[in-house]
Image: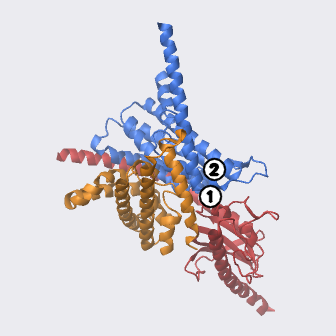
Amino acid sequence: MMKDIVKLGLVLAAFAAAACVGLAFVNLATEAQIAVNAEKQLNESLSGLFSEAERFEDLSAELKSPDDGVKFEAAYLALRAGAPLGLAVKASGQSYGGPTTVLVGVGLDRKIVGVRVLDGKDTPGLGANAMNPTFFVDKSKKTTFPGQFAGKALSDPFEVKNDVIAITASTITSKAITKMIKVAADAGAVRLEASAQATQAPATGGM
Amino acid sequence: MKRLWKIFKQGIINENPLLMLMIGLCSALAVTTSVSNGVGMGLAMTFVLLFSEIIISLFRKVIPSSARMPIFIIVIAAFTTIIDLVMKAYFPELSKSMGVFIPLIVVNCIIMGRVEAFASKEKVVDCVADALGMGLGYTWVLVGIAALRELLGNGTLAGVQVMPASFQPILFFILPPGGFLVFALFISLNIWLKGRMQKAEAKSAAKAEEVAA
Amino acid sequence: MTKIFIIALLINNVVLMRFLALCSYVGMTSDVGQSIGMGFAVTFVTVLATAATWPLYHFVLAPLGLGFLQILVFILVIASLVQLVEFYLKKNVPGLYAAMGIYLPLITTNCAILAVTFENISNKYSFIESIVYAVGASLGYLLAMVLLAGVRERIKNSPVPGFLKGTPILFAATSLIAIAFMGFSGLVK
């Protein structure tokens, strides 16, 4: 009886160990590529927002969300020749089907440069259209849902069905994403002005 | 060879895991909003099924029967993790659109069922035939459902616009209720196909008997 | 918190909107009593599994960089949990075991439980939020089970069109229930 239990245990342990070792190898082989994918997606989105930027400074540790419903995951300051061009904030929050992540860029003129919906779990055919590059909320101008925010001033009301066009039959998704964009852009604009002043101060002081 | 062909053929219609055995349904309905998802899910699941069956069949003589369930789970979970990591690394878009349903291959009853009923008893070559047959049976249904839902619900096939621009997509088919309805029709279709095939077989058997007589 | 609960229970119902746990949905709803037993057994195990896997991931797997073992570890935890619950009930609460026992072995491969534990991690829920999500999702499962079981009792005595006889009619009926559930989508803003 005892012998049987030991034998069973050994066989089980052997299978579990073999599985873990095998997975460790596969993980080692794919880990780098997965990290590269995530970085590539972020870089493409960042340089898509600020095509003129030469480099991005990571400010993720400095920016905290003022709103409980929206989390700031990262923030990047776009720089050209040492001077700030704009700030991108990666924010996530609850949408209709689960957490959604957006990347919001603000410029020095307190206008939104652009918005990318990076990740979401909404219903295909409805809320997921926020991520669909061929779904147009304004068919005549061919603007996508995140696309309509480009160039929008932060002083606008940001109200769905008022100045923001909703995705058909997905008002909840539209409202949730609009709120995330507004919160992220407001915080981003404040932080951006601070860095703009910091870089300008020594320059004017020298003259 | 003929025997292998027979095993392979079983999974496609007669014992189709989705339409006849009614197992592994979750992923079949959840990911079939587009053809590319259907193909991806079908191949991922076939991969896990094939390798799990091979490994279990190879070790079938050393696996003690009282510990077989946990061992099956370990093997299936290992291959599921492999396909999950590989897809994340090389097909990030596809992996994202299928989300939690890739890790859920581990509890896909088709795999557990085939490993328990087939691989733990049969030779490796037979298992390869069985896994490929079942995998193909699963994949064709997935792609079929996905094609119908994507075409009617979005006007596209594998992301390419096929319907004329004037076609107003019938959103219903992409939404969950549409998935259930399309699936009901597919089961119905399969029952009809099976009935016809059996009738044809009976007829040819009767003919053969006549000739022999 | 209530938002997570309502979304998990009605708006994103595990069975009707997310297509999870369909095997037992079709297999275990031939009568109402059975569907209730299965529903409560799943609720019980889901909450227990969440309470076990959440700390395991955040205090063991993630700090050690072993996130890739998540699938393997979670399914083994659920499988052994089901075994333990079975032993415990058999010995100490025979009444409950008699009611729930037969469903327990089927629960290991119930994908709703595993999906809930994965989503608690990927949605970055806190421990309390995870438990709320687990309760909401599994009660949603119970609700869907009871609804279909009720419909099936009616179907038994109804004339069904020939081509829908058997399982197809179950999915056609489910399609209608799902349409009704889509009406809940405005419940949370």
Answer with the quarter of the image where residue B92 lies. Answer: bottom right
Task: State if disc 2 and disc 1 touch (CB < 8 Å).
Answer: yes
Task: Please tell me how crowded label 2 is: few (under 14), some (14-19), or many (20+) other residues with Cα within 10 Å.
Answer: many
Q: Position of residue C165 (x, y in %)?
A: 49, 41
- At 45% from the left edge and 29% from the top edge, which residue is drawn? B125
Amino acid on which the number 1 mark rests in the picture: Pro
Q: What is the tally of numbered marks visible in this picture? A: 2
Viewer-closest of C68 and B72 = B72
- At 29% from the left edge and 45% from the top edge, which residue is drawn? B67
Q: Which chain is orange?
A: C
Answer with the quarter of the image where residue C53 lies. Answer: bottom left
Q: Say which mark, if any, is on residue B34.
A: 2
In whole angstroms, how far apart are the C-alphas of marks 1 and 2?
9 Å
Check disc 1 and report the residue beneath it.
Answer: A124
Q: Residue furthest top?
A: B213
Q: Which chain is blue?
A: B
Left-right relation of A32 to A129 = left
Left-right relation of B165 to A195 = right
Amino acid on which the number 2 mark rests in the picture: Ser
